[in-house]
């Protein structure tokens, strides 16, 4: 997989930009396939064209005022303005442990089994750098967040994608179509070189939420083959529970999994403060120590005052978590209906704040030929909306070619405007 949108500029003649004496590329060969991300390209295109940016996944409003004020208090009180403790401030580690107990009945020691990171992205990188040796295979569900591939490469691992494919969800109805995990394919992907499974549920970009049965089968496989598992659960509170979609189920809660699972969480998605970069890891003392050994040489520490604010955020009443889910459910339904009316095939997400669509039903437009890259690069000029081609999240580019992702974590009036623009297609 490559998450690039163009050349990295790392090859060329000696003395040219991007090359060193003797012609050796400046960029480490492990990162040679990675360049400027598609998010940077499409966001720049949004600015240049004045288009509505439904590409990059960040809200266009801040989170709760009381949480923002908690950060201001911490700044003014001098809490976190200097280096915070390496594992994270005690208040946040205690809040994370209490959160896991409150929502999932999982008990963690805040002093030995919780590690605060600079967002989930650092948690993912530190986990893979700590746990993967060169040559180890890492299985990830494809399509996957682009930092997964880069982190596996940095660790010297070999990524092995298992592709989620369009199919029927548990309910079997048209509105329940989702991207489905083939458990037989997952099992067949495990070899003697497999070290780790890298999972993401709720899943970005498809919006799939793995079912209890799927998670149980993954747990059984991990125990049977003695695999470590890193689970990216940053969208844990953005699950739109109904009769076919369960509430979030941490993999660590399944038999035999607590001792082999590194669970990653984050404040950015739940509380709409993505710029604060506060994430965390929960696991056994041994696994947390391993991850911390890598993490300390990445950022060392980060986000001092914001850690105190996130500690307060995690203790918000259940009404907050219900409220954000219901708000995003309504926005999901608004954008889903609008995209359907505009002619897209829509995979209504069970979680996250992204919608994956298939552009092939827009058959009257031959300019893109089912190519999500061409479609997304033309869309800002044609309709004044920016989206992301899902192919950037695939090793198997052909499998992702016709799919395009839209973010609905925006104000309702912005989504309504985008829908009207898209209908012009």
Image (cartoon, rainbow, N blue to C red):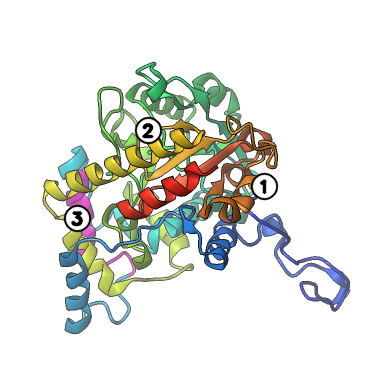
Label 1 to label 3, Cα distance in Å?
41 Å
Q: Earlier in the sequence, mark 2 or mark 3?
A: 2
Q: Earlier in the sequence, mark 1 or mark 3?
A: 3
> Where's the N terminus, which quadrant?
top right
Tell me the mark number nearer the camera, choosing from 2 and 3: 2
Tell me the mark number nearer the camera, choosing from 1 and 2: 1
Disc 1, SS = helix
Task: Please state the horizontal and vertical placement of residue 172, each as a whole percent of the image.
Answer: 39, 16
Q: Which residue is mark 1?
A: 374
Residue 209 image label: 2
| Above or below: residue 273 compared with residue 202 | below
The magenta-colored residue range is 86-101
> Observer-nearest residue: 338 or 112?
338
Q: Would you say the residues marked 1 and 2 are in contact, meaning their CB atoms lie under 8 Å apart?
A: no
Image quarter of residue 400: top right
Image quarter of residue 159: top right
Q: Residue at x 14, y 55 (%)?
A: 315
Q: Would you say the residues marked 2 and 3 are in contact, meaning their CB atoms lie under 8 Å apart?
A: no
Disc 2, SS = loop
* Residue 74 located within the stretch drawn in magenta: no
> Where's the C terminus, which quadrant?
top right
Image quarter of residue 296: bottom left
Q: Would you say the residues marked 1 and 3 are in contact, meaning their CB atoms lie under 8 Å apart?
A: no
Q: Residue at x 37, y 45 (%)?
A: 353
Label 1 to label 2, Cα distance in Å?
29 Å
Task: Please state the horizontal and vertical placement of residue 366, each as a whole percent of the image.
Answer: 69, 37
Dominant secondary structure (helix, strand or loop) of the stretch shown in magenta: helix
Tell me the mark number nearer the camera, choosing from 1 and 3: 1
Residue 314 image label: 3
Residue 258 seen in render: no
180 to the left or right of 75: right
Label 2 to label 3, Cα distance in Å?
22 Å
């Amino acid at each position: 997989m490559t998450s690039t949108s163009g050349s990295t500029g790392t090859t060329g003649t000696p003395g040219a930009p991007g090359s060193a004496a003797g012609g050796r590329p400046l960029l480490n060969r492990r990162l040679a396939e990675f360049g400027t991300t598609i998010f940077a390209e499409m966001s720049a295109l949004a600015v240049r064209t004045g288009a509505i940016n439904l590409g990059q996944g960040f809200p266009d409003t801040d989170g709760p005022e009381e949480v923002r004020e908690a950060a201001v208090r911490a700044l003014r009180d001098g809490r976190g303005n200097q280096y915070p403790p390496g594992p994270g401030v005690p208040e946040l580690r205690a809040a994370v442990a209490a959160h896991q107990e409150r929502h999932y009945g999982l008990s963690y020691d805040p002093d030995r089994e919780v590690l605060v990171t600079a967002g989930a992205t650092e948690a993912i990188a530190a986990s893979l750098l700590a746990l993967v040796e060169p040559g180890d295979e890492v299985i990830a569900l494809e399509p996957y967040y682009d930092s997964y591939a880069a982190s596996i490469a940095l660790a010297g691992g070999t990524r092995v994608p298992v592709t989620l494919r369009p199919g029927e969800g548990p309910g079997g109805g048209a509105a329940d179509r989702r991207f489905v995990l083939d458990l037989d394919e997952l099992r067949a992907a495990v070899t003697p070189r497999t070290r780790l499974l890298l999972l993401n549920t709720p899943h970005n970009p498809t919006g799939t939420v793995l079912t209890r049965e799927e998670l149980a089968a993954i747990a059984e496989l991990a125990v049977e083959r003695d695999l470590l598992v890193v689970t990216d659960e940053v969208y844990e509170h953005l699950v739109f529970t109904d009769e076919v979609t369960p509430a979030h189920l941490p993999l660590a809660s399944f038999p035999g999994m607590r001792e082999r699972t590194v669970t990653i969480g984050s404040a950015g998605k739940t509380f709409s403060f993505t710029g604060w970069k506060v994430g965390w890891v929960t696991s056994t003392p041994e696994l947390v120590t391993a991850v911390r050994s890598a993490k300390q040489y990445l950022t060392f520490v980060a986000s001092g005052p914001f850690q105190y604010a996130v500690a307060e955020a995690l203790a918000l009443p259940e009404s907050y978590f219900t409220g954000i889910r219901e708000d995003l459910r309504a926005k999901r339904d608004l954008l889903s209906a609008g995209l359907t009316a505009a002619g897209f095939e829509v995979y209504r997400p069970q979680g996250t704040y992204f919608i994956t669509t298939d552009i092939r039903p827009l058959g009257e437009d031959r300019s893109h030929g089912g190519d999500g890259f061409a479609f997304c690069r033309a869309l800002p000029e044609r309709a004044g909306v920016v989206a992301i081609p899902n192919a950037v999240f695939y090793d198997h580019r052909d499998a992702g070619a016709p799919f395009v992702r839209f973010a609905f974590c925006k104000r309702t009036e912005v989504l309504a405007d985008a829908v009207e623009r898209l209908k012009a297609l």
